[in-house]
Amino acid sequence: KGQVVTVLETGKRYTVISRVLIHEDLEDVQPQFAIKNARGVSFFWTNTFVQGKSPGAQKRGAVLEAKFHITMWLGVGKYLVNFVALNSDKSVYYDRRLDALEIEVTGGAGKVAVGSATNLDCEIEVNQPE
């Protein structure tokens, strides 16, 4: 708990933290977090506006912290994490940290095949014919 990790296990809970230093008074700023694969295909993104957690106006010098609590349901592989600070109508990007972090998702208990895009937490039941 509370440790920085870049190798994540599919099916486990994690917290992704974004901190935004505010350089000028802003009426609206929305931290955003996104994950894509190495080919640039977006697998997930959300922001405080989408989640209904808009932080409101921010004063110069403040550090806005957003914690994104997630369950890692991506498949085994390497991914890139983006962090963005923007306004709610997405017409102004205050900061974009594209490919800021590379993460690797492992298969955990061998329940997810390499090449699967997601982990659907599948349980298999086999009934043998009599």
Image (cartoon, rainbow, N blue to C red):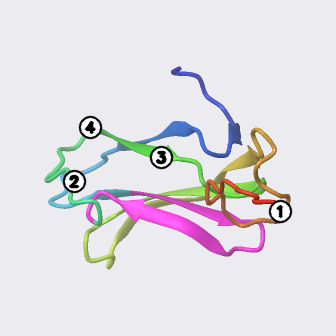
The kind of secondary structure element at disc 1 is: loop
User: How crowded is the residue under tag 4: few (<14 C-alpha within 10 Å), some, or many (20+)?
Assistant: few
Q: Name the residue: 82% across, 65% down.
A: 129
Q: Position of residue 73 (x, y in %)?
A: 60, 54
Query: Of discs 4 and 1, which sits in the foreground?
Result: 1
Q: Is residue 49 above or below residue 101?
A: below
Tell me the residue that label 4 is attached to: 61
Indicate which disc, 2 or 4, sits on the residue closer to the N terminus.
Answer: 2
The kind of secondary structure element at disc 3 is: strand
Q: Is residue 126 above or below residue 105?
A: below
Report whether 121 appears left or right of 18.
right
Distance CA(mark 3)–CA(mark 4): 28 Å
Q: Which residues are magenta?
A: 32-49
- Asked if the residue at tag 4 contacts the one at tag 2, i.e. Cβ–Cβ closer than 8 Å, the answer is no
Distance CA(mark 2)–CA(mark 1): 55 Å
Residue 44 among those drawn in magenta: yes
Q: Position of residue 103 (x, y in %)?
A: 71, 47
Tell me the residue that label 1 is attached to: 130
Report whether 66 appears left or right of 98.
left
The kind of secondary structure element at disc 4 is: loop
Tell me the residue that label 2 is attached to: 53
Query: Of discs 2 and 1, which sits in the foreground?
Result: 1
| Residue closest to the eye, 89 or 36 | 36
Residue 9 among those drawn in magenta: no
The circle drawn on residue 70 is 3
Indicate which disc, 3 or 1, sits on the residue closer to the N terminus.
Answer: 3
User: How crowded is the residue under tag 2: few (<14 C-alpha within 10 Å), some, or many (20+)?
Assistant: few
Amino acid type, callout 4: Gly
Query: Of discs 2 and 4, which sits in the foreground?
Result: 2
